[in-house]
Structures are given as C-alpha cells and as structure tokens.
Image (spheres, rainbow, N blue to C red):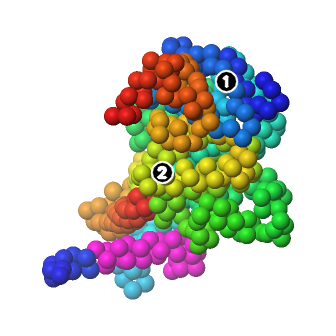
Amino acid sequence: MTHNTIVHVMNLHKCYSTEQPVLHHISFDLKKGECLGIVGESGSGKSTLARCLLSLIEWQQGQIYFEGLGLKNLAPKQLRKVRARMGAVFQNASTALNPSVRIIDSLMEPLDEHKGYTPSFLAQDSWLGRIGIAEKLLALVGLPEKYLFKYPHELSGGEKQRVTIARAISTEPAFIVLDEPTASLDVTTQAIILNLLKDLKESLSLSYLFISHDLAAVHFMSDRIIVMKNGHIVDQFGVEQIFSDERHSYTKQLLQVFAG
Amino acid sequence: MRSTAALKQQSGKRRIKYTTLLLFVLVIMVIIMTPEITPQDANKLIIGNRLLGPSSEHLLGTDHLGRDLLSRMIAGVRTTVGTSLLILSISMVIGVTLGLLTGFLGGLYDRMFKRIVDAFMTLPDYIFAIVLSGLLGPGFLNLLFAVIAVKWVGYARLVRSTVLQEKEKDYIKLAELAGVPALRIVKKHLLPRVMGNVFVLAALDLGKIILIIASLSYLGLGPQPPTAEWGSMLNEGRVYFNTAPHLMLAPGIAIMITVLIANICGDRLRDKLDVRMKKGA
C-alpha cells in the first residue's frame, strides 16, 4: 500500500451462510484518481465486493483500508465520517430514489446529514442556499432546475440515474462505487451517462470502482481491469493489455463472447 | 363515445361514493356531538313509557325500561363506532411500531417477533376475542384489551413484510451510506411507504371491529348496563322481538349500515391508493 492508494483490499473473504464463500481471499489496490473496472458473470461476487467496500455488509476475514483506515469493526461515528468520503451509484435508478420523496430531498439527503458542508466545487458560491446547491448539482449532471420538485416517476431512467450521480458526488467523495450504472439504460443513454461519469472523474479527481458485465463499457471507463469468477480474481491487467496473449483463458472467453 | 348505460353506471357509482362519504362524515359528527344532539337522556328510565311504538315524542319508540330508543341509538354510535375507532387507532400504533422496528432491525428480534405473530395468527379473531373477554370478565376496558390483542397482529405483519421488501431497496442503502441514522430512515423512508397499506387495512378492518364489539356486547362481554351499545341493545330487544321488533331492528340495521359504509370506504381507499402506488412505484 503506497501513499497514493485510496482503497486497499487485503485477503477479503465473505460467506452469506456456511455454504460456498462468495468472495475468496480477494486482494487489490485502487489508486487515487484511478478507475478500476471489475468484470465477471452474474454471481461472480462483484456486487458483494462493492457492498463490502461501502461497509454496507460485514465480511468474515480480511481487511479493507480506505485512505489508510481499516473499515472492519469501525465505530459507527467513524464509519459515518468515512462514508461521507464515499459515494455509490447502483444499477437500478428506480430503486435508488424513494418514489414518495421529491427529487430535491433525495438529492440533498447526504448534504442534509452533513449540515453546513458545501462541496468545494460549489464553494465559490458561498451564498447558495439549499435550493441553490441542489440546482447547481443538477446542472453538473446536465439536468434543468425544474426537475427539483418532481417525483422520481416523472423522470426517465437516464434522468433518474443522473440524479443518483449528482447525489453521489454531492459530498465531494474521494471514491465512488459504480455498480453497473448503465445496465438498465438504453444504448444512447448508456453512452451519455458513461461520458458524464468520465467528465466528472476528470473534473473532480474522483476514483471509481466500475462494476459491469459490459466489457466495452469497462474498457471505455477503466484504467485497470479485474476479472472475477466464482468469487475469485482470475485476472487483472492494465486496460491497454486487454487483448494481450497473456490473458487468462476466462478473460479470453469473455472477450470472445462479447465480440459475438 | 360512451354508451348511455355506461354513463348511467358511472353516475350511479359516483352517487354511491358520495352518499357513503357523506354518511361516514355524519357518523363521525354524531360521535363528536353525541351529548348535543341526543333528544333525551339515553339512560332515563320511565317505566310507564315501556315498549312504546314510534311517536312524535319518541321517534323510534321506547325500550323495555321506557328509555327513548333514538337517544340510545345516538349514544350507541359513540360507544360502538367510537370504541371501534379507538381500538383501530391503538392497534395501528402498536402494530406499525413493532412491525417497523422488528422488520428494520431484523436478526433475532425479527425471528422472535415472527414466531409470536405466527402464534397469534393461528387463532381465529372472533374466538380468541371471546375467550380473552370471557377470561378477563365483562367491561369496557377488558373488551378494549381483548379486541386490541386480536387486531394489532394484522398491522404488525403487514408492516413487517413491507419493511422487509423496502429495506433491501437501494434508496435505503444509499440513505445508510449518506449517514442517515436508523431511526430517521424508519421515519423518513419506511413509515410513509407503509402507511398507505396500513390505512387501507384499517378502513377494511373498521367494519370487522364494529361487528366484533357488537358480538361481544351481545354476549354480555362488552360495556355494562346502562351504557347504550348497539350489540347489547340487540340482546335486550331479543326477548321482545314478537311484541316490539323495533328494539332489535333499529340497532341491527344501524350495525349493518355502518359496517357497509366502513367497507365501501375501505374499498374506495384501496382503489385510490393502489393507483397512486402504481404511479409512484
């Protein structure tokens, strides 16, 4: 683990019951400003890994260090502080927003919990009130302010996903987990969302853990790629080495399937 | 273009809807204003007036003790429907609170709670309420306790199952991630999500509770004389059915109409909230 590492996963082992483990002694690093892609078929443990990294579920063995701090058995107060530096965008934008809560309240929930905090990318507008901050956040993801007082069912899938992205960056996190953020969207909207995520990463110096089974999306977004199968890491490489002969047979198989 | 028959049917449905709503509001008004609108003292005995038929002085006649039946019927609204609403509210508060907490906390609390609820659910409402009332003895408070003991379970079960579904949704995980404390997640996200279903169940339950209370009172397990209660009035009038049928007909019809109003209101509420859920989900 170097000073440039934001997430260090060491020997992570997770079982849901006494049966087959979902994650088998996983280890990897994520560097600041990097996008680490995770690919694998359904059931390979990608989403479980994401939930462990966000400390939303517990794990049996190993440790996850976030900015040098071990997350296992962390006191709730400390965990709350750490989580303010993390963000998440999940696959299904429809379930990521409470259907009975207006967009402004969903969007501002993280900032409402950290009262008085204004993200530095909005700090030049120190006079901004709650609505002002919400408008700026929506503008960052290319949505007009009129959406603030709408309910989620009045927005399209792509628009909802933009709202969840705006919410994820609102506390200015250092690290965002993107768990198949484009899986439920049509191809055109997928491209728009991926470009938006890439632009935000550059402008806000974010680190991403990008989970997908879409190799093209992972290739477009990531600096490095990890391939998972049945809870094991079977391959990891820099994105430029994706077509190298040294690739694991399972990676080649995935590439072949994807090439059609 | 809609046919005349369809328009007639729609207008008929609308008429039923507004009439029911009006009657429901009327029942609530009667509960609130009972002392003001009762024409005579509901408990005043005038033995010389016993078993009189309807007249200008006693619009529904008098009972076997010479009490004005209309006054007793109005006083009975507060006892029967008012008690039902009180039982409904207390059952809702207990059921919703326990369902929310155990569903959200999960683990051992939830497993224990599920066993308790399952045990309660195996017992039929009426029989359990009668047994409990019988064991506790007659009286208003015992009746209250017996019916609440039967009714809270349905709310707890409904809320728990809704919470178990909702808490796995991403917006709850994201709230957790945003640092929202557990109690606020319950209050802000889960409570509003469960209340729609709870209100529908409550509206459908009101009729059943009125029937349980009337049944228990009919058996002599409810409020004791001279309190006017529709179930006990039915029982008192039973002996005189051949000579003074109005003594049974008045409370009987009142129970039937009130239960009907409660059920129609419940159905309407369910239809309305279902549409909103579909839109909002």
Residue B117 image position (x, y, % from top left): 51, 34
Question: In the visual, does A188 lie left or right of B168?
Answer: left
Q: For residue A230, which numbered disc appears in the image?
A: none
Tag 2 secondary structure: helix
Q: Please name the residue that numbered disc 2 is placed on.
A: A190
Residue for point 52% across, 18% down: A246
In the orientation shown, which residue stands out farthest toward the bottom?
B56
The magenta span reads B13-40
Q: Please name the residue that numbered disc 1 is placed on.
A: A28
Residue nearer the viewer, A25 or A106: A25
Does label 2 lie on the same chain as label 1? yes
- Label 2 sits on what residue type? Gln
Residue nearer the viewer, B29 or B106: B106
Q: Is residue A95 magenta?
A: no
Whichever of callouts 1 and 2 sits on the residue coming sooner in the sequence is 1
Residue A248 image position (x, y, % from top left): 49, 18
